[in-house]
Image (cartoon, rainbow, N blue to C red):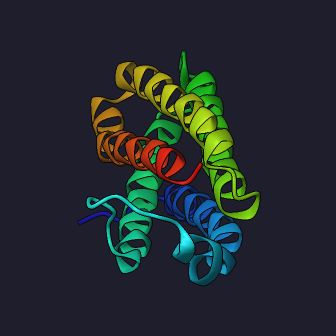
Amino acid sequence: MRLPPLITIIKFIVAIGVCQLAGFVGSLFTTPSIPTWYAALRKPSFNPPNWIFGPVWTSLFVLMGIAAFIVWNKGLDRKGVKAALLLFIIQLVLNMLWSYLFFTLHSPLYAFVEIIILWLAILLTMVKFFPISRAAGYLLLPYILWVSFAAVLNFTLFRLNP
């Protein structure tokens, strides 16, 4: 079996690393509010236990990194790759922004408005990824499904905690 070139391995590590870094930054906004503000919120019956969020997000960020790697590895000179990766970075920034709005600013309303924009950015990223690599587009499916659930949860938390 022939090993991939070093540049391919580096791209893979960078793609996964950038996504995990985004998750880490988001956790810096999130973690301080979990035992205080978030613990005091009224929650719906379908609110997952706190321990589930870390493993789910870590897994989603790995899938996102693999998707970005696949697209990036097609070559920046290929039609649509730069635009797709730019949209990917935008949605990654929006992902971190949601954590800031919800957990640092304690604003379920602003976070809800923002998560709708995030959802649209993920959808657009998927639309851009599919022509480049169907696998990369499908790798974002669990992410958009989780963000869909998060949007419902976010809205419900807003309604339960006026």
Residue nearest the observer in this picture, 116 or 88 = 116
Query: For residue 11, which quarter of the picture?
Result: bottom right
- Residue at (41% x, 76% y) in the render: 50
Q: Is residue 112 above or below residue 14?
A: above
Residue nearest the observer in this picture, 73 or 98 = 98
Query: For residue 67, which quarter of the picture?
Result: top left
Q: Is residue 118 above or below residue 57?
A: above
Can residue 134 be seen by looking at this rendering? Answer: yes
Residue nearest the observer in this picture, 112 or 144 = 112
- Residue at (43% x, 68% y) in the render: 58
6 lies left or right of 21: left
- Residue at (42% x, 43% y) in the render: 70
Can residue 76 be seen by looking at this rendering? Answer: no
Q: Quadrant of the N terminus?
A: bottom left
Residue nearest the observer in this picture, 3 or 116 = 116
Q: Position of residue 77 (x, y in %)?
A: 61, 24
Q: Position of residue 127 (x, y in %)?
A: 41, 20
Residue furthest left in the image: 1
- Residue at (53% x, 39% y) in the render: 72
